[in-house]
Image (cartoon, grey):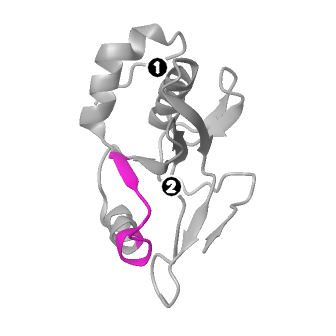
Amino acid sequence: MAINPNKFPRTTGRRGKGGFREDLGIYLRSTWEANYARYLDFLLKAGEIRSWEYEAETFEFNGIKRGNRFYTPDFKVINRDGSTEYHEVKGWMDPRSATKLKRMAHFYPEIKIVLVDQKQMLSIHRTAGNLMPKWVVVST
């Protein structure tokens, strides 16, 4: 069962430069997540998606006693056809993140997770980065 996370983000020190993004009106935990949110806004304005939310839902892994018991995807995306996807922005795949994604596939096989990695972020930067005024160039 999905539950709503707290309104304020958790700080773990594991991510990049988090902060409030004036252009988006929300706090995001990293520059990559902020750039991806700008890209989702771009898709929204172009009519390619219906909506998106940041850290909209948290999924619990019932029965897990140790380790990663919860997972909060970075973005919830509602497509034009009404289908829902969850997008996870990952610069690198550490063991903790890999475990969460494996557990998500096991406990919630009906939920579609889209992994947005360095390759996809570079592609977005090359094709659309200059169309988004607040896009931040990040060294990879």
Residue under the image location 36 percent in, 69 percent down: 105
Q: Can residue 111 be found in the magenta stretch?
A: yes
Residue 121, horizontal then vertical, whole percent: 33, 31
Q: Residues within 10 Å of mark 1 (few under 14, many from 20)?
A: some
In three-dimensional space, the C-alpha distance between marks 1 and 2, rounded to whole angstroms, equals: 22 Å
Residue that label 1 marks: 136
Looking at numbered disc 1 in the image, what kind of residue is underneath it?
Val
Looking at numbered disc 2 in the image, what kind of residue is underneath it?
Pro
Residue under the image location 51 percent in, 18 percent down: 46
In front of the other: 140 or 37:
37
**As drawn, which residue projects farthest toward the front?**
81
- Is 116 located above or below residue 110 in the figure? above
Sequence-first disc among 1 and 2: 2
Q: Is residue 139 visible?
A: no
Residue that label 2 marks: 73
Residue 125, horizontal then vertical, whole percent: 34, 20
Magenta residues, as a range? 104-115
Q: Is residue 103 visible?
A: yes
Q: Residues within 10 Å of mark 2 (few under 14, many from 20)?
A: many
Image position of 88 (left or right of 5): left
Tell me, yes or no, whether the two marked residues, 1 and 2, touch with CB atoms within 8 Å: no
- The answer to which quarter of the image holds residue 94 is bottom left
Q: Which structural element holds mark 2?
A: loop
Image position of 78 (left or right of 99): right
- The answer to which quarter of the image holds residue 106 is bottom left
Residue 36, horizontal then vertical, whole percent: 47, 32
Residue under the image location 59 percent in, 64 percent down: 58
Quadrant housing the N terminus:
bottom right
